Amino acid sequence: MIQFTPSKRMTQMQSSSTLEVLQKAEALRRTGKDVIDLGPGEPDFNTPDNVKQAAHRAIDENFTRYTPAAGTAELKQAICEYLFRQTGTRYSSSEVIASAGGKQTIFNAIVTLVDIGDEVLIPSPYWVTFPEVVIFAGATPVYIDTEPNAFKLTAEMVAEKLTPKTRLLIINSPNNPSGRIIDKTEFEQIVRLAAGRGIYVLSDECYYKFTYPPHEPFSAASLPEELRRYVLISGSLSKTYAMTGWRIGYALGRSEWIAEMVKLQSHSTSNPTSIAQKAAIEALTGQQDSIEMMLAEYGRRREYLISALNQIEGLECVLPEGAFYAFPSIKNLLNGKIKTSADFAQYLLDEAYVAVTPGSAFGTEGYIRISYATSLETLKKGVERIAECCHKLLYQ
């Protein structure tokens, strides 16, 4: 029997650590274990009814055929109008693409820009997919360690990593996994620095709307026009409208870059699902009160969780300004038995049936990511189990 050998590019790509956590939790749950899953980056809210009804209408009206690869004109217009309402900046139809989720727009953006030998700056901690796509594209990820500044990226940090090979900088604010945000003034300084060197910026704004007061949402679309020419914005409906399974994302940027992304998409997935596109139009143009409801609930969970974690001996956690993740340090708990964040995550799963994601998955050792996109009741139960495990590590 001939053995299957994957391509070299695939042997360089790692599986998604966040999905692995989900699979481990599901496997335990199938055996009857009471698993507290604090791993997924997925809202625990349902898709708003008006959005679901729009999808029903699309089916009833037989809107089930191919659309243009970049999405329908109606959806692209809705995306442009949404950004205009948020930022006051106008984008044209040639400057927008709709894709099968934000992950696809990020893949398309990186693959159409970088070449072998290029370097891509990625602040750490980072979302697990960023470096994998960069490596797949043949470029080299160059990491910017933000831990010394409490996970806050600065222009000075970026400047220290720039080389003649730098082609792209990836920014994710609010950040997954830390929940930290980049101040508007600092954000502009970072982009101005990159633009001055002819370096492009990919702004992942997946958690754009989930920013807690007194901080306000900030999009790179608000930057001056001369800077926006170097920026591609990646957005998603998955978190904002609890539409993770619908797979609708979008990107906005200079038309030349978008055109290459459309070309790539036309040969990979073609158009986003027609029915999901109709649902997305309703999400972007219909009632927006679900966002405020979700943000308020996430805010309550955040206040409880960060306070509770900081009361557990051995843990330390900064207050996230956005998204729905806590990223506590477990460095005080690492010992001869538990040496890494992966060890700690496995220990929690084995001993307490609590699933979290190790910080090593995000390029930052000594931390774990806890998602509070789950009920307050579940969070409290999970925190109690985590506290018991931490106590055992310290005193047994």
Image (spheres, rainbow, N blue to C red):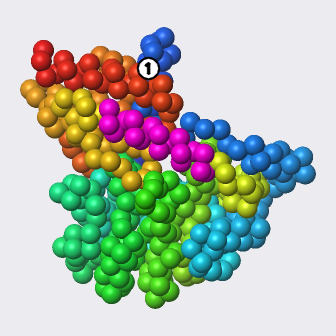
Q: Position of residue 83 (x, y in %)?
A: 61, 70
Q: Do we see residue 45 in this rendering?
A: yes
Q: Quadrant of the N terminus?
A: top left
Q: Position of residue 309 (x, y in %)?
A: 29, 34
Residue placed most toward the observer, 240 or 353: 240
Q: Quadrant of residue 15?
A: top left
**Is 132 covered by the magenta stretch?**
no
Q: Position of residue 160 (x, y in %)?
A: 18, 73
Decide: is 78 above or below 324: below
Decide: is 254 above or below 339: below
**Label 1 residue SS:** loop
Q: Residue at x 24, y 63 (%)?
A: 144
Q: Residue at x 50, y 53 (%)?
A: 210
Decide: is 70 above or below 179: below
Residue beneath label 1, please? Answer: 35
Q: Name the residue type under label 1.
A: Val
Highlighted range, magenta: 291-308
**Is 298 covered by the magenta stretch?**
yes
Q: Position of residue 40 (x, y in %)?
A: 46, 37
Residue at the outermost right position: 61
Residue placed most toward the observer, 187 or 74: 187
Q: Main secondary structure of the magenta part?
A: helix
